[in-house]
Amino acid sequence: MSTDPLVVFTPSGKRGHFPTGTPILTAARQLGVDLDSVCGGRGICSKCQIQPSFGEFPKHGLTSSDDALSEWNSVEQRYKDKRGLIDGRRLGCQATVQGDIVIDVPPESQVHRQVVRKAASAREMIMDPAVRPYYVEVDEPDMHTPTGDLERLATALKDQWDIENVTAGMSVLRKLQPTLRKGKWAVTVVLHKGHQDSEHRILDIYPGYDETRLYGLAIDLGSTTIAAHLTDLRNGTVVASSGIMNPQIRFGEDLMSRVSYSMMNPGGDVEMTTAVRTALNALTDTLSAEAEIQPSQIMEAVFVCNPVMHHLLLGIDPVELGQAPFALATSKSLSLHVADLDLTCMNPAARVFILPCIAGHVGADAAAVALSEAPGEQEELTLVVDVGTNAEILLGNTTQTLACSSPTGPAFEGAQISSGQRAAPGAIERIEIDPATKDPRFQVIGSDTWSDEDGFDAAIATTGVTGICGSGIIEAVAEMRMAGLLDAKGLIGSPEQTGTPRCITEGRTHSYVIYDGTADGGPLITVTQTDIRAIQLAKSALYAGARLLMDEMGTDTVERVVLAGAFGAHISPKHAMVLGMIPDVALDKVTSAGNAAGTGARMALCSVEARASIEKTVREITKVETAIEPKFQEHFVNANAIPHATDPFTILRSIAPLPDALFNTQGSGEDGGRRRRRRAT
């Protein structure tokens, strides 16, 4: 085992041991980490900016001290003096490894920017927003009636619009008098009234009759990605969408890792809160620029997020969510002022609404999915699966709705996979394996051309083939199973067993070669036995959660499956079923809902009635806690097989036959496995 310092890069999850004194840029290049540089490491271009993290990282198995990198040098100081450098950042070409360290590569330092696959779904919105403009004509001040301008404005709103109980914050009071006089006592007032509010809040005021568009943000704050949709509050149209990687990834890829970081590092929760709020401000600024609007036109933001993200957004230490009974600080919806969350790239009087959480491990994002997909209103028994590093699962019909969460981990995102990476141009996202020749063909993000088609090399000239993302690894494992490269237990066969030299020996196990670019200085992209195990663990947790809900409902089958999130939009139902991620069901009954959590956030942004509706729905959902259910472990173990050890998957076998005798020199997977064990004994 190497005694050299361990360097872990996020968000890619790639890691390696490097001798003391190795530049971070060199380490990144050797691991294939996407870190930009155009000046040859001379500290001129600043493209290789990195963000080191210090403290205890149980997820990565390391503790990073303040001296884990070389000291700040004159090259970095010169660059900061001339062009500026965000506090805490270093130049990867100048900082060298001195000890174990976690390095975050910010989006602007990545050559191939991450593709955040959470686009707004096409959905007609019912418009009943909390924010509305009103034109009023206000009485001029009169020495004989000594009332203030705000009071006379309130009287005008009551007389002309039947609106009572109006309040205003300091940002409005400061501009109230000059605006009234500029408009010659006619103004357009922007009011906010939530579904539980007893009064209207004045958010802004414009002179005269003003048709300035008003906007809101629907934000899906995930543990891996943050997606935001800038929405016109007049008609519900999404005018700009954007997404970024959640910068908290450097503190841990999954939720429990972040809870652990908070537990083991005093002030760690504050670090993570600051990181995500800074990212939200940057994302909001990006959307405003893209839509060519002023930040002051953004009047409200609606957030959906899992419980840990919920607490960290609010600045609440999530420590209680890391241990039974997984108590939330509050499960109710929240209506806040933007200043409460340090959101500075919006109107200074803007409001924030956060959907209610269902339970300690089932958050506001699951509530948003329930609002969007409404499983409790379906006649068919419907399973809704929103997959991320933490899967939220809903099962329901008009009789009852159940919910649970399941810790799938980051493998579905391409993390913890030997050749894995986040979704970015150059990443393999689709793959097919010929069952006769065992040869693969694939597509990469950024090109529609398959690898065996003319023009592929030209199509990927700017990106190359860089790795395999979450959708690619899922399809790869399923295709390996269908092509006879993998047995039911998840074991990759040898070259002799599978009949292809693409199955290479690596110690006591085997790997399957998808792409070999080493001759041209490119990567060797393989699926290893360790990769298979990571996918098995992730899919087993997902399936076990769904099976637990089915037990609670008293059924062995479902009638319809809805795949939500980035996973749902980019994985074929057949591959998901071959892998055993979802129950056996007719393929035409498996549909994609896209970013259902984001859609639910937009619905709540556009309608106060939708907010009231989801609060009622959340109170009626039955929560099943996977952590304390004895049968969860049984279901998890059975789901380790591909597709499953005990559930028959009858429909699947009729549409995607799975080979029984995978390894022609050892017999069938299970029988051959038993013979091999007897010989070893």
Image (cartoon, rainbow, N blue to C red):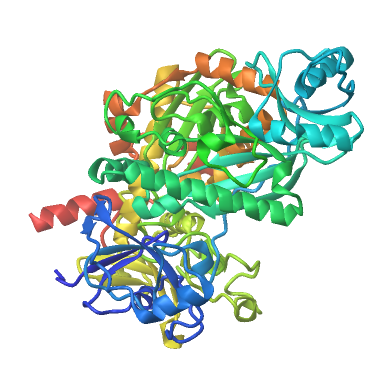
Q: Eyeballing the image, is 524 above or below 382?
A: below
In the rendered structure, the answer to whether residue 187 lies left or right of residue 109 reads right
Seen from the viewer's position, the closer of residues 441 and 401 is 401
In the rendered structure, the answer to whether residue 600 lies left or right of residue 251 reads right
Residue 1, quarter of picture:
bottom left
Seen from the viewer's position, the closer of residues 482 and 37 is 37
Q: Residue at x 35, y 57 (%)?
A: 416
Seen from the viewer's position, the closer of residues 407 and 262 is 262
Note whether residue 487 is visible.
Answer: no
In the rendered structure, the answer to whether residue 60 lies left or right of residue 476 reads left
Q: Residue at x 75, y 52 (%)?
A: 291
Seen from the viewer's position, the closer of residues 275 and 119 is 275
Q: Position of residue 409 (x, y in %)?
A: 37, 46
Q: Eyeballing the image, is 402 above or below 269?
A: above
Q: Position of residue 468 (x, y in %)?
A: 46, 64
Q: Position of residue 97 (x, y in %)?
A: 27, 73
Note whether residue 636 is visible.
Answer: yes
Quarter of the picture containing the C terminus is: bottom left
Q: Eyeballing the image, is 379 above or below 34?
A: above
Q: Residue at x 70, y 35 (%)?
A: 174
In this view, which residue lies farthest toward the front? 143
In the rendered structure, the answer to whether residue 165 lies left or right of residue 84 reads right
Q: Position of residue 588 (x, y in %)?
A: 63, 38
In this view, which residue lies farthest toward the left? 681
Labels in figure, total = 0
Q: Eyeballing the image, is 520 above or below 104?
A: below
